[in-house]
Image (cartoon, rainbow, N blue to C red):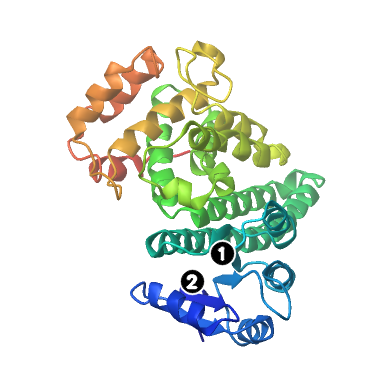
Amino acid sequence: MSDPFNTLLLVDDEPNILSALRRAFRKEGYEVVTANGAAEGFRCLEERPIGVVVSDHRMPEMTGVEFLTEVRRRWPETVRVILSGYAEPESIVAAVNSAGIAKFLTKPWDDNAVREDVRGCFDAYRISAESHRIARELAVKNNDLASLNLRLEAAVSESREKQEEIERAVTAMTETLASLQEAADPFFRGHADKVRDLALAMARALNLPAADRWTIATAALLMDLGSVGIDPELRRSHRVLSEADKAQIRRHPEIGAGVLSLIPRFAGVARTVRHHHEHYDGSGYPEGTAGEAIPLGSRVLALADAYHAMASDRPHRPRRPHDEILKALGDQRGRQFDPTLTDVLMSVVSDVQDPASKVDSRMSKVEG
């Protein structure tokens, strides 16, 4: 079967135009399929999955806008491009409104520009396909979550003898939510486990009660849940982000907290997740909350998250040395981080030289 991520359909009633377009894409590595009109184009789409279709506008059986409008109805995932020697405003408006085209190309064309435009269309197809895949996984996980929530509600309505069942349901729900987070980016799971362990060590050093330790541990596992609502290409991008990109990424604490707030047992967890990117001096997000108005659990998570982010290898950079991490955290004492909690973290990890291994082995002994 053809790979839609690599299959390009060219539709034109003029053989010389099809030949010229095929030559333009000869070295691009695409599987190029050609059709000499709308009817043959439909047959090609019925026979194989296609990622991008480029169609001439003026064809005898139907116009390119009419053809691509039908393509949109029957194969909505396929990215649609129209090619025309007549750039009339009404044609462009019709193409955008009716056919939902991604690009309007004019004849004669520049081969390099057309190749660049089509590459962009295949990138858009990949992003759309990834988003649909995650949406399907989320639908399955949401069904699991709904079932677990029903179990939890049923357990809560029973006597104290059902407390063990309640805790099992809560644990299962936490694991289901964590798997949603991992589906967005596998890095989250390993990172979340390490943040939980370090946050729990800090909670014990602060002599926090068991209920608070549970809230902090659960929030650590689910703090990036809202990232499932962020464009996956944007999360993985190493380019300089625009202000609009940054604004989208900064929505993830609110998205995650919104999901968690739907579960009564997770009210404290939701509040902790919502504020874990606030800064002690009020310069963080989403609300710009400052000082001790930031929930204690959120201030603990902010430090544990920052520590292990710097202590982990990422595709775009290696881990930072332990002493360099402590200096970076110390430089932000009273600005990004709670000064008292910064001292607690440094005390917890002060005798560790290899944060990637010794911290994890020691923190794994901490009980919630």
328 over 248 or under it: above or below? above
Q: Amino acid at mark 2?
A: Phe
> x and y percent of residue 303 in the render?
39, 27
User: What is the CA distance from the residue labelled 2 to the residue labelled 1?
Assistant: 9 Å
Contact? badges 2 and 1 (CB < 8 Å): yes
- Local packing at callout 1 (Cα closer than 10 Å; few below 14, some 14-19, many 20+) is some
> x and y percent of residue 276 in the render?
50, 28
- For the residue pair 245 and 260, the one nearer the viewer reads as 245
Q: Mark 2 = which residue?
A: 5
Question: What secondary structure is marked by label 1?
Answer: helix
Q: Is residue 351 left or right of residue 23?
A: left
Total marks placed: 2
Q: Mark 1 = which residue?
A: 129
Residue visible at 70% across and 80% down in the picture: 60
Residue visible at 45% across and 15% down in the picture: 280
To which quarter of the image does residue 132 belong?
A: bottom right
Residue 3 seen anywhere in this rendered image of the structure: no
354 over 113 or under it: above or below? above
- Local packing at callout 2 (Cα closer than 10 Å; few below 14, some 14-19, many 20+) is some
49 over 287 or under it: above or below? below
Question: What secondary structure is marked by label 2?
Answer: helix
Q: Which mark is residue 223?
A: none
113 over 276 or under it: above or below? below
